[in-house]
Amino acid sequence: MRQRVSVGLAVLIVLASVAPAALAGGASAAVDDGDTVQQQADPDTDTIGWEGGYWHNESIDINQSDGLSDTEMDALVSRGMARVEYLRGAEFESDVPVEVISREEFQSRQSGNATSNASYDAWNSQVWEALFVVGESDGANDAIQSATGQSTAGFYAPGDDRIRIITDSPDSPTIDNATLIHELVHALQDQRGNLGERISSAETQDADLATDGVVEGEANYIEQQYTQRCGVEWECAEAPSSGGGSGTQAPPNLGILLTLLHPYSDGPVYIDWLREQGGWDAVDAAFEDPPTSTEQIIHLTDEEPVPIEYEDRARGGWETYPNQGVNGSDTVGEASMYVMFWYQARTERAQTISPRSVGQTTSPFDTYNYDSEPSAGWGNDRLYPYHEGTGEDARHGYVWVTEWDSEQDAAQFHNTYRAILNAHDATSEGANTYVIESGEFADAFRIDRQGTRVTIVNGPTTDALADIRPRTQSDTDGGSDSMNSTTESEATETGSTGLEAPGFGALTALVAVLATIALAVAVRRRA
């Protein structure tokens, strides 16, 4: 079985402003004039934009300052369903129960559902270490839990078809409207297309993020449209402001967080592109047959990853994890590679890309940027974690095979990756071989470039590299060996104040998200 941790279905994100003109329009089943709708009688049959006795643009008398009564909760949920129907142009098949639980109960359920899989934990930690996001002393799963579980506000559970709102005051609950709308979209997705099956179908990190690009992209796309109408076309019962998470909690790993935010950021852009291609029918088709890579989400393309054949040549007791991932491998994809370059630029001043690039978006639906020169041109990748021995005495390494659209793309990735090693004071120890002597990523590395393929071999020592991936003649025929080669032009900005403590707008916005983000972590098991 393969256990994966990925973004779940409950998110409360402070999004960048979206131009109202870009969000104009919706289903045509109900009139936009609130007064006209309020004067209409209830329809004889259920219709789009009407649920539980409420029209989508009908005002309701609710004050959340003292919590919601059962009657107020029912009204808020029914009108929320009507609004989701109106914006999505689709009908709910049944009511969506909303359950309020205390944070203590939620934490107890999390503890009760927790599983332990040492093989998966070691395998997954190597994946995140290869991305220079989680170091050797930190387990990836703990870091992910810390980044995503600090203030969960609610989630939709496909298994029992209900939304759960988590609150510190269950006797006087309140609901953030955007969270409710977001989760109601997931409920609609589930009723129309089996959400549980969809989110459990991806087998790699990249495919999982790409699938979530449709699932979460649609939810955020509709949430943005809803938010734009609040206070303009629609009255919205605002929840009292929250004080945010505890100030005693350690800040989460921004590399993990930016990776997991990709579907919520670029997904709405992808949904808008699909709608331009073929309306909501195109979105439905993507839900049934999701994109397979974040490259498709980032660049709005149908281009499929190129196949990568891999032959395990390890010796000396080094083994893969054949029961994890896809025959022991994961695919991290373009979005995760962007984060690797961004995170190392910000934390280590690596001459990779400008940290400011995260805020250089081009769409009103977009929140963060995941496009950079050294990560664009991605064709595919397969990352194979290795181990020698078991338990606490085990040694670890990996082989990361990357394929690129052109030799120029491969050379650019190669050179920019070496800039990360340089930022960690790596020393050259032979042909394309480097050693980081100390720190969280202290290891030996070998980079073999041949044509459009760049293969990175990692191990605890240079001798281990030869056992994890013995060299062939083709491995030695590749690119140059210079630790000081020039990287992309973006890297010239890394000496500016943008690399210092978060003082520029995009990073400030990213940190601000941490105060309100609520990501329910779904632990998935797959064969």
Image: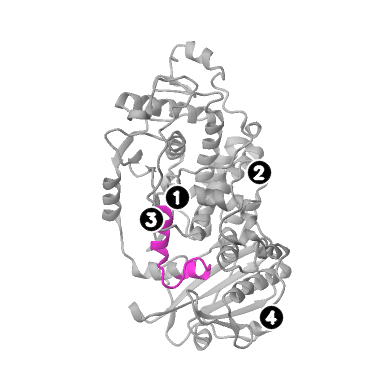
Q: Earlier in the sequence, mark 4 or mark 2?
A: 2
Specify few, some or many for label 4: CA neighbours under 10 Å numbering under 14, 14-19, or 20 or more: few
**Residue 66 image-quadrant placement:** top left
Give how far apart the Cα atoms at labels 1 and 4 are: 43 Å
Q: Amino acid at mark 4?
A: Ser
Q: Quadrant of the C terminus?
A: bottom left
Q: Which residue was labeled with disc 2?
A: 363
Nearest the viewer among 429 and 150 is 150
Numbered disc in front, either 3 or 4 = 3
Give the label on residue 482, or none: 4
Residue in view at x 56 percent, y 17 percent = 33
Q: Amino acid at mark 1?
A: Ile
Label placed on residue 174: none
Q: Residues within 10 Å of mark 2 (few under 14, many from 20)?
A: some
Query: Mark 2 near mark 3, Cβ–Cβ under 8 Å?
Result: no
- Find the distance from the CA under tag 1 to the CA under tag 2: 26 Å
User: Which residue is the site of mark 3?
Assistant: 249
Residue range highlighted in magenta: 126-149
Tell me which label, 1 or 4, sits earlier in the chain: 1
Is residue 192 highlighted in magenta? no
Give, as a three-letter code, the residue at label 2: Ser
Q: Nearer the viewer, residue 416 or 311?
A: 416
Foreground: disc 1 or disc 2: 2
Q: Residue at x 40, y 33 (%)?
A: 240
